[in-house]
Image: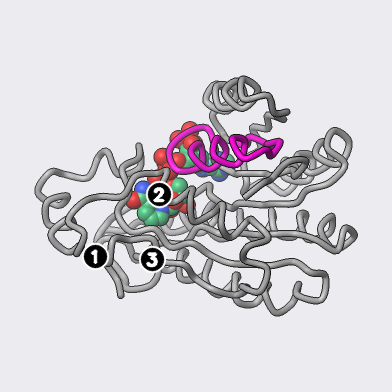
């Protein structure tokens, strides 16, 4: 796979899975828009992208903020002139059992995980449709496919990401834009660092491959879907979960 000359935006790429995606795409030749609410983390990822000989734009747009997302795409247009790959990776959890969950926990998760994807897709689609080329990959989750106790907000948002993916695959196909989702299972990142040991043991017991996944293993799937090797694949959900959900 060769991404030389391609321009990729990875939201939430200051750490975790997003950082692995940004660095893998850069390894394969892409210039990267590093987006994260944590500017220091975004700058660190950008430094590593540049050290690989690629260009990087840093944006600390909050993906829930329409104005900030618009400005991010304006700087992409002026500095890169195009966007070939959008990876909607930024996501959060605010877990609680249903009866303890506050409205705010619901709203925050829906905002980042769903509205953020909507806004970034909307601006990217405008540029990609003019180019008649684009690859959009949304990060869903096994929770969105099979549900998970304590994650009614998160599971609903990630199920929604799958619906966005299927709808946009149909809507944007006429512009030669492929839209797919990757649904990770249990992956070792800052997001899962706070999972209690007992729960982690239980979760790994549910995984036929008997281990958590690495961020790089999600990045590998993204690279395939971002490449022209997956030209005839659109509207699909690629589960990368060690067999947790089959
Ligand atoms: P992570 O380590 O928490 O990384 C997420 C990144 O997104 C963080 O750098 C975070 O910044 C950034 N971010 C959060 N809200 C943002 C916003 N509004 N705008 C821009 N950036 C924002 O999580 P991860 O595990 O790498 O998860 C990446 C994606 O994979 C998420 O969509 C997640 O739901 C999904 N996923 C993860 C797992 C897993 O097991 N780890 C499983 C299934 C799906 P701050 O940290 O500074 O807030």
Q: What's the residue at 58%, 67% (across, down)?
A: 180
Q: Secondary structure at mark 2?
A: helix
SS for tag 3? helix
Q: Position of residue 69 (x, y in %)?
A: 72, 45
Which-is-in-front pick, marks 2 and 1? 2
| C-alpha distance separating marks 2 and 1 | 25 Å
Query: Who is closer to the viewer here, 63 or 209?
Result: 209
Above or below, 87 against 76 in this view is below
Q: How would you rate the neighbour count of disc 2 (Cα within 10 Å): few for under 14, some for 14-19, many for 20 or more?
A: some
Q: Position of residue 64 (x, y in %)?
A: 62, 49
Tell me where residue 129 appears, x and y as whole percent: 85, 63
Q: For this view, does 75 lie left or right of residue 213? A: right
Q: Which residue is mark 3?
A: 155
- Residue underneath mark 2: 217
Q: CA distance from mark 3 to mark 1?
A: 9 Å
Judge: label 3 CB < 8 Å from ligand 1: no
Q: CA distance from mark 3 to mark 2?
A: 22 Å
| Left or right: 37 in relation to 127 | left
Quarter of the rendering occupied by the C terminus: bottom left
Q: Is 32 colored magenta in this rendering?
A: yes
Q: Earlier in the sequence, mark 2 or mark 1?
A: 1
Residue 47 x, y percent position in the rendering? 60, 20
The span picked out in magenta is 13-35
Q: Circle 1 — which element?
A: loop
What's the colour scheme?
Answer: one colour
In the picture, the disc for residue 149 is 1
Residue visible at 52% across and 71% down? 162
- Does residue 8 appear anywhere in the picture? yes
Q: Per the image, is 143 magenta?
A: no
């Amino acid at each position: 796979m060769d991404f030389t000359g391609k321009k990729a935006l990875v939201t939430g790429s200051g750490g975790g899975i997003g950082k692995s995606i940004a660095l893998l795409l850069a390894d394969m030749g892409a210039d990267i828009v590093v987006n994260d609410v944590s500017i220091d983390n975004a700058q660190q990822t950008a430094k590593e992208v540049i050290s690989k000989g690629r260009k990087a734009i840093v944006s600390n747009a909050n993906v829930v903020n329409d104005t900030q997302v618009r400005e991010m795409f304006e700087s992409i247009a002026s500095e890169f002139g195009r966007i070939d790959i959008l990876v909607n990776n930024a996501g959060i959890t605010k877990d609680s059992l249903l009866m303890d969950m506050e409205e705010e926990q619901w709203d925050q998760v829906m905002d980042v995980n769903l509205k953020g994807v909507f806004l970034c897709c909307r601006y990217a689609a405008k540029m990609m449709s003019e180019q008649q080329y684009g690859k959009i990959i949304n990060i869903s989750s096994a929770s969105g496919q099979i549900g998970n106790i304590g994650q009614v907000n998160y599971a609903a948002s990630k199920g929604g990401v799958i619906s966005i993916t299927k709808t946009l695959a149909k809507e944007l196909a006429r512009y030669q834009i492929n839209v797919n989702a990757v649904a990770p299972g249990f992956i070792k990142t800052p997001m899962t660092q706070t999972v209690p040991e007992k729960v982690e043991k239980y979760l790994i017991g549910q995984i036929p491959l008997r281990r958590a996944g690495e961020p790089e293993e999600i990045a590998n799937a993204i690279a395939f879907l971002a490449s022209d090797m997956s030209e005839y694949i659109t509207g699909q959900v690629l589960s990368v979960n060690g067999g947790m959900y089959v």
